[in-house]
Amino acid sequence: MDNSSPKIYTEFLPISRADMEARGWEQLDFVVVGGDAYVDHPSFGTAIISRLLEAEGYKVGVLAQPRYTDCEDFKRFGKPKYGFFIGGGNVDSMVSHYSVAKIPRAEDEYSPGGKGGARPDRSATVYTRLAKQAYPDLPVILGGLEASLRRFAHYDYWLDTVLPSIAEDSGADIISFGMGEHQTVEIARRLAAGEPVESITDVDGTCYMTDFDHLPERYVECAGFKKVASDKTAYAKACRIQMDNQDVVSGQIIVQKQSEKYLVHAIGDMKRLWKVLKQYGVPSYKVSERIITQMVFSETLYEEEHIFEDYYLSDNVYFRLKQAYLAYVTREYIVYGRSLEKCVFEIIANECDQKEDLPDVCKIALLKYYSDKEYTGELEDVLHQVLREMCEKQLVFPYYMNYKEEWLREVQLYNKVMAAYRCKPGGKVRLYYKMKQKDREELGYRAEAMMPVYENLYVKQFVLYNDESVNYYFQESGNGEMITTDKKTLKTDKERVFAGKYQMLNAMTDMDSDAERSKAMLEFEEEEQMADQIFKIY
């Protein structure tokens, strides 16, 4: 590679060995292969990619419409130093060859003289295979329209069947999809630096094939080739996942299993720009705002918590966006079990402390998060107030029971036990339970149609005496199926020190002497009468 300032040539790029030698070149760095006639104009992808590589200082040759009966044309320039960039042409080769009625076309507008037959069916796949056949050890990067549209398992109109990714069919090392200029430059630089093509797996706008053991740490997976080939619903859902993750802000890496190996599809990531801005101390809240806005709008959020924290701390936060984000992520946390960074809950706690208006789901999430964690004195006041508020609204969940004894007494939860269930969206839930007192157990289960406490979350509260327990199970119906949970048993917490009226009633159940129990009952009645006189209901 020539690292000096790129020389801009006014003549065509080499298309033969003679052209290459006329420039004094003994070996090319890259060969760019195209399915069209060589037209050196920016409306042709081959021209753009080849000139881009030339501008980067590489020695480039153009192999236009090579002979496809064997691989000899791919040896026209000799072995390139770094590899091949291949495209099928400006128009899909199958569209060039056949009408919508699958009748062969007589002409090809992108071939010399408009004559057909200068390129093969599925030219991108054929060219890639021939390049690999000519030089098996050289990297082949496949791009262009034909590759972009076939990068996932896809329906083929002409064969009327679903085919695997072109990455599998062609054997290309990397698929570059969409507008490929940035990918081309980065891949070329890394190949020229001696990096093996197998390790170039992090370029935005590319796909590659790998095995299960080498998949990235985080990704979304759509149904594999065999599944989508046999199930139209799975095909549609896979397409939806693919479409939802094309956005540079909210898109995630997509993985789809092909015949044996996995296709890994990488998309651009604006979060990377945010990280660079933070690294160099550049104000980043505008980028943060755009990322959060787009993520909330597309309902695709992941690894964004610290970006929102950056936006929140900028003092330029838009009230509605703040509310929308916190409501969305805490609902995901409560309803679907999504994990969230601590900073989200610290923000919610600060909002509560400042008496800002927040959706109830944010406060429920705050109580859930800190129910099994240590918290500061300042946060204690916030949690105490939020617990009172949620209990007043009857938004009660089992994890509240982990808070302080005096708090639970205040909201009348201390002597209770709870059974909870999360059902699928649209389901209906019934609770079946029966009480047991010492050795006496009810003969049959009582049935109770449940109302959700929040969305698809159901909670039933029980007050049990020391010698009581309740056996229960849930039954969910909906979407043509019936789900019955395993049977479980609820008992009182023997380690808990009971207080108030329930403590007195529990103590009576353990008394062996009738006289002692009668005395306790009289004392209980006196306290009840006194309480009625002191605490009036207005």
Image: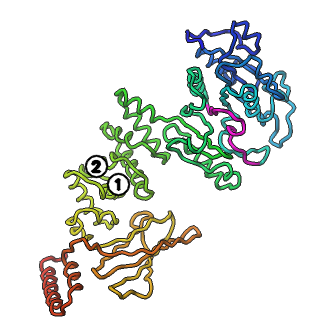
Q: Residue at horizontal 24%, vertical 51%?
A: 353
Residue 418, percent across and down? Answer: 35, 71
Which quadrant of the structure image shows residue 334? bottom left
Which quadrant of the structure image shows residue 4? top right
Q: Residue at horizontal 38%, vertical 71%?
A: 419
Residue 160, percent across and down? Answer: 78, 48
Q: Residue at horizontal 37%, vertical 34%?
A: 285
Q: Secondary structure at mark 1?
A: helix
Q: Is residue 68 left or right of residue 219?
A: right
Estimate how packed mark 2 is, as few (under 14), some (14 to 19) or many (20 or more) residues with alpha carbons within 10 Å: some
Residue interval drawn in magenta: 161-178
Residue 123, percent across and down? Answer: 76, 32
Estimate how packed mark 1 is, as few (under 14), some (14 to 19) or many (20 or more) residues with alpha carbons within 10 Å: many
Q: Is residue 395 visible?
A: no
Compared with residue 535, is residue 384 higher up or lower down, i.e. above or below? above
Q: Residue at horizontal 49%, vertical 73%?
A: 475
Residue at which label 1 appears:
362
Residue at which label 2 appears:
351
Q: Amino acid at mark 1?
A: Cys
Q: Is residue 408 left or right of residue 63?
A: left
> Magenta stretch: residue 456 in it?
no
User: Please, which residue is most extreme toward the bottom here?
Assistant: 514
